[in-house]
Amino acid sequence: MVVISDMLVQLGQMTLVLLLAPLLTGVVRKIKARLLRRKGPSVFQPYRDLLRLLRKEVVLAENASWLFRVTPYVTFAAIWVAAALVPTFATGLQFSWSADLIAIVALLGSARFFLALAGMDVGTSFGGIGSSREVMIAALAEPAMMLMVFCVALIAGSTQLSTVATFMASSQVGLRVSLGMAMIALIMVALAENARIPVDNPATHLELTMVHEAMILEYSGRHLAMIEFGAFLKLLLYISLIICVFFPWQITIVGAAPLSYVVSVGAYLFKLALAGFLLALFETATAKMRVFRVPEFLGAALMLGLLGTLLRFVSESF
Amino acid sequence: MIPGVDQQVWCVAALLGTTLLAIAANRSNKSTTVVYGATLVISLIAFARALSFLVAHAEATEMVLPIGLPWLGSHFRLDALAAFFLAVVNLGGAAASLYGLGYGSHESAPHRVLPFFPAFLAGMNLVVLADDAFTFLLCWEFMSLASWALVMAHHREADNARAGYVYLVMASFGTLALLLAFGLLSGAGVGYGFAAIRSAPHAPSEAALVLALMLLGAGSKAGLVPLHVWLPLAHPAAPSHVSALMSGVMTKVAIYGFIRVVFDLLGPPGWSAGIVVLVLGGATAVMGILYALMENDIKRLLAYSTIENVGVIFASLGLALAFQANGLGLAAALAFTAALFHVLNHSFFKSLLFFGAGAVLTSTGERDMEKLGGLIHRMPLTSFAFLVGCVAISALPPFNGFVSEWLVFQAVLRSPDLPQWGLKIMVPAVGALLALAAALAAACFVKAFGVTFLGRARSPVAAAAGEVDRCSLAAMYGLAALCFLAGILPGLVIDGLAPVAQAIIGHRMPVQANDPWLSIVPIAESRSSYNGLLVFVFITAAASLAVYFIHRFASRAIRRGPAWGCGFADPTPAAQYSGASFAQPIRRVFGTLIFQAREHVDMPSPGDPRPARLTVDMHDLVWERLYTPLTKAVWFFADRLNQLQFLTIRRYLSLVFATLVTLLLVLAIWS
Amino acid sequence: MPNLAFDIAHLLAGGLVLISFMMLYQDRLYALLNIFALHALVLALSVAWQAYVQNAPHLYVTAVIALVFKAIIIPVALHRIIKQLGIHRDIETAVGIGPTMLAGMGLVALSMVLMLRVTGAADPLAREDLAFALSVVLLGLLVMVTRRNAVSQVVGFMSLENGLVLAATGAKGMPLVVEISVAFSILIAFIVIGVFLFRIRERFDTVDIGALDEFRGERR
């Protein structure tokens, strides 16, 4: 019985993230536009964009290799698998034990690895500049992420996201300044990983300032659709991760009544919308920083993670 | 037939026999095939025996040969630790032999390689088998010299001569440190046999000194910073299959020496030893990979990346020491198993990558990445195998590199259990260093693969490259398959390592074979678990699903066109991102501090037809701050002593007389 | 919940350390002053919480002193000084931000290890407060060492003093007399430094203390 419900939750989760991801990006774009006093496209525009891209033909560069054509699917699949393993509305995921938080981060790393390679495949300078900056940002974000994981694992005693969410949803957590620090660190890392302002600008097409967009400049048609979809999913994944680790209220714990699933899906949607609003607000209020300010930004995230860990040790020693 | 030490010794004897054969059949045409064929067969047999020893959980066996010191003989012993490292050595040896069957035919001077190759393999086998201090040191030196001879195979190139020189000096220094370490261990009537050393008590001060000497001796062989300087010089100088052996296997023999002495013979030293090894490992990992990122010679890049991996292994061993000193047996077993797993993984993918680099070298004659590019079109099979190696070494799931890194992080996460504050704080910091090293490794191998195999050819040789022979490809694909298998079935490897951890640490990780779906669970399932197989299946299924849907319901049309160049038609391949420019962001972030990198821009004024120039100044601080002063001091004293050669006879006599009187004086004061 | 007292004290003291780090990260003068005001505010809250927990009313006075002087008067005064003097609003750092933060981390780790080991027998709240207080003091010193600008050195000095107050309140309060004298000494120090600022400025036309070195014939 539990197996069946877990399986259903798992499948539901996989479809839910797939369906919601473009909507989230659409909402963020819409709110940003409204904040700038623009009307902005409909929140369903990302779906239309994807469909349009899928119908278009692919223009491949002359010396693009098989790697270039395989990469969109590999990155999409890796991100989708990772997104399917982060508990969104219920902890009872059938396969949540197949990868813990570290493995999920590494899965996203695999996706980025192939994308960076694809950026270098065509042999133009744009792809190269995008790839080299992307790996630089990733190299700095990863230790910060690890320390964040460490801090959370110290408090929850696990890197298994289901266990973490269950623990955090219980009342035994208390007030923890370390948790706050870990959360800020995770938000900073999430901004960097999703190529959001202030690290990168998802809307720019000015060659010298872009990172992620430069890397995928040569993609078109269905390949671009896959990559865009992957990016939407990744944003959803990181927001779900923040929600799951730090605000898992109303998440359904294994073995609850069917009705609670409805409540928790609602709560999840609400939290998602709130996070999208905050993201849009933040992006409107800040400016993009120079590429070489990014190390300081991510260094601060690293310090927050380390400080959180240290403070946790102190309060734990009593 | 029970696997025992005698069979391994027979294999070594066969390898030495092959050496003799190679010397005898010096100039024959067939000698390449015969020698590599023989080493392939022997290595496979030795590997199979070592593996069956591990799987059967067999008892340790010993034997004494009446050679070596007359009153001592040579002791050999096969236990779980030795069997594991024998498996690593011989698997690497077999792969290198298979590769050599093809690669060796391009060798310009086979008579400089063939006799030493089996000797080198034999030397590594013997070090692992040795069971007394004298035999160990002798075999260690034999291994060093054989590998030195292989480094000097192409001795007419100026760089190689320097590499050989530096290697010789560092190897002698390492052996000296080992000699002193064993002298301390077996001093005061303990005896040279490992059994006697193991059972004798060791004072804390002595243990600390032995640990320091082992870090110098084994560390210089393995490539711990700052003793790593010879490695990026010597490893690339040898023929590629030997580079693979030196990087993938010989560094592991050095790690074996460290484990054997520090964990086994010395007994667990205090937790402060753990912290030293841990911090050295973490620093080595980050420094090694930063050096690798700055490198544009593909074989040197691989050699530097070896330093990173050795750092990871040492950090993990340091964790094991720290846990063991505090009686946390299970955590120590976890860290120790992670270290051994990484030893195995690194021997797989580093050999594979060196084979790939060798294949590129054979088909283009270039090691400089800035002159390569676009090889994915010309050498599709090699490039695929190389890609597998790159993904594996970058610690990305579902390949094997990720599993061992994941285990190391799981061990790091156990650090709150440690009572000492210094360790509690250092372990997460080193964990962050390891994460940084892993992310930088991914960056480094994006660069290695991207610049070498992707893009457009940067030189005519790269444009005209062709695929390599079948034997080389077979070796590469064999290793790639092993990388994949160890990645999706890690539970089998962990269970295989259990007897080693049991023998050395006294504990083992929980049995993994019974876990559902072949996942691995280091401590408890509620804490953490990972399943490479499922992750792989999921990714494949999701990707196939996406491909199916798109090709079924969306457009399938493809048009080829020129790449977008901002309006410029057909830019030259030189306009691509090169290796140096790829590393530029990371050089800006870390280089100013670590390499004292400075950029100078020479921008001509408008109207001046001179080209603009960007030059980057980089300094290897380890070399400049440590080795250059050291060499200068040695030269200074050598110059002073040199004057002794030009004295009159009377002065010589007075020198002798003064020495005699001084000695007598010392004696008088002493007693 | 019995642990709530401890949790909130932990939160506030940890927040103080975090704000000290924000000072290290900041490279604009006005932002630095705002952060300093925040620092003083959190200190005031922390002291007030201690007063509540320890039931020591005189600590409320300390909290009010911290709030009025350090969170309001001094930042406002420094704002005006900066405006009057027309000081360049970028802070010149002597060492890059990354290494400074790393050093700061090392200092925090050091003070934790040291304080928790030395004060083994004391009450957990006091132990923790002492450990955090030492970190704040050391970070304040670090700010002073790594900044070239005199105003930011003043801020570093004041944050150091905040750390001392935190330590004093954590150790079961201290007599009000000491308290007042500390407050006065700070005020005096502030005045002295203020006067110095004007003097330096008059003489060298900058508040970069590097000018002093050059005047004395020393190179940076």
Image (tube, coloured by chain):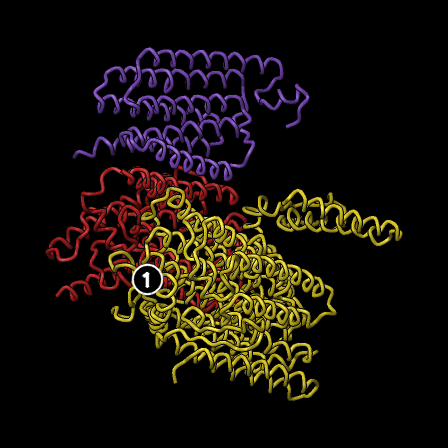
Chain letter, colour red in render: A
| Apparent colour of chain C | purple
**How many numbered tags mark residues here?**
1
For the point 29% across and 29% down, which residue is it?
Answer: C122
* Residue A179 percent location from the top left of the image: 30, 41
- Closer to us: B30 or B222: B222
For the point 78% across and 51% down, which residue is it?
Answer: B641
Chain of the residue under label 1: B
> What amino acid type should be assigned to the residue bearing mark 1?
His
Asked whether the viewer can see residue C220, the reply is yes
Is B574 rendered above or below residue C161? below
The residue pinned by badge 1 equals: B507
Q: Is residue A4 left or right of residue A295?
A: left
* Residue B510 percent location from the top left of the image: 29, 64
Q: Is residue B628 left or right of residue B417?
A: right
Is A130 rendered above or below residue B45? above
Q: Quadrant of the N terminus of chain B?
A: bottom left
- Closer to us: B33 or B124: B124
* Residue C152 percent location from the top left of the image: 49, 24
| Apparent colour of chain B | yellow
How packed mark 1 is, by other alpha carbons closer than 10 Å (few <14, some 14-19, many 20 or more), is many
- Closer to us: B327 or B60: B60
Asked whether the viewer can see residue A283, the reply is no
- Closer to us: B512 or A96: B512
For the point 34% across and 32% down, which residue is it?
Answer: C15
Q: Quadrant of the C terminus of chain B?
A: top right
